């Protein structure tokens, strides 16, 4: 008899309108969802700097399950762009958005973050959770900075492996915190 396929562990929204709502994690090994504890730490770091998420325009890049962007929406962000290229992750993002009835506040782009073109406007908050130890976050941020996704008022949150060095020309590190195997780095554009 064949063993049943194991279901990916569930995650929960930490705070806001959708607090405690379960999110679906993508099946397979292609994505590594941000743990609830890490997400809680990240949003605490952001809240102490932003004060409120009300009305923010957010981008969740290397989105995985969409948990980071959905957490921002739960806390009052106005809208979120989710960018992901893995098919299972895209299915999970769309299912999570539908379960929360948040379609009117969300846009999902299937593709690589580095494939994004010029931005119409800079985002208020850019969340990135790229694969660890690849440098993909730094490459993406360098490109997004050039293409207008990041403005002077933009806050950037990058999750990397705890030992990964973060250094991106044009951006300055505002704060770093290690949480288990992860490192959370908050960045801002260097003022001209």
Image (cartoon, helix red, strand yellow):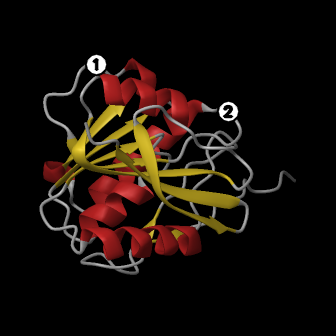
Element assignment for label 2: loop
Q: Quadrant of residue 77?
A: bottom left
Residue drawn at x 47%, y 67% is 42
Q: Nearer the viewer, residue 37 or 18?
A: 37
Would you call the spot at circle 2 few (<14 residues within 10 Å), some (14-19), or many (20 or more)?
A: few
Query: Tag on residue 117?
Result: 1
Position of residue 37 measured from the top left corner of the image (x, y, whole percent)? 57, 75
Q: Is residue 7 visible?
A: no
* Whole-number angstrom distance, CA of label 1 to CA of label 2: 22 Å
Above or below residue 171? Residue 24 is below
Element assignment for label 1: loop
Q: Nearer the viewer, residue 141 or 36?
A: 141
Position of residue 133 measured from the top left corner of the image (x, y, whole percent)? 71, 39
Work out whether mark 1 precedes mark 2 in sequence or the reverse, and give the earlier one.
1
| Quarter of the figure with the C terminus | top left
In this view, the residue farthest toward the front is 192
Would you call the spot at circle 1 few (<14 residues within 10 Å), some (14-19), or many (20 or more)?
A: few
How many circles with numbers are drawn on the protein? Answer: 2
Residue drawn at x 70%, y 43% is 29
Position of residue 115 measured from the top left corner of the image (x, y, whole percent)? 39, 19
Would you name the residue on which mark 2 appears? 134
Q: Nearer the viewer, residue 163 or 18?
A: 163
In this view, the residue farthest toward the right is 1
């Amino acid at each position: 008899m064949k063993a049943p396929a194991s279901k990916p562990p569930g995650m929960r929204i930490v705070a806001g309108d959708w607090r405690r709502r379960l999110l679906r994690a993508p099946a397979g090994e292609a994505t590594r969802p941000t743990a609830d504890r890490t997400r809680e730490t990240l949003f605490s770091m952001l809240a102490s700097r932003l004060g409120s998420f009300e009305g923010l325009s957010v981008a969740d890049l290397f989105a995985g399950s969409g948990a980071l962007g959905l957490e921002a929406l739960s806390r009052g962000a106005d809208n979120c762009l989710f960018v992901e290229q893995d098919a299972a992750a895209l299915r999970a993002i769309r299912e999570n958005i539908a379960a929360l009835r948040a379609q009117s506040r969300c846009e999902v782009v299937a593709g690589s973050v580095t494939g994004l073109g010029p931005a119409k406007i800079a985002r208020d908050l850019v969340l990135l959770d790229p694969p660890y130890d690849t440098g993909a976050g730094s490459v993406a941020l360098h490109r997004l900075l050039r293409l207008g996704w990041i403005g002077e008022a933009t806050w950037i949150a990058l999750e990397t492996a705890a030992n990964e060095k973060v250094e991106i020309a044009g951006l300055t590190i505002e704060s770093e915190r290690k949480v288990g195997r992860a490192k959370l780095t908050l960045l801002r554009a260097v003022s001209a």
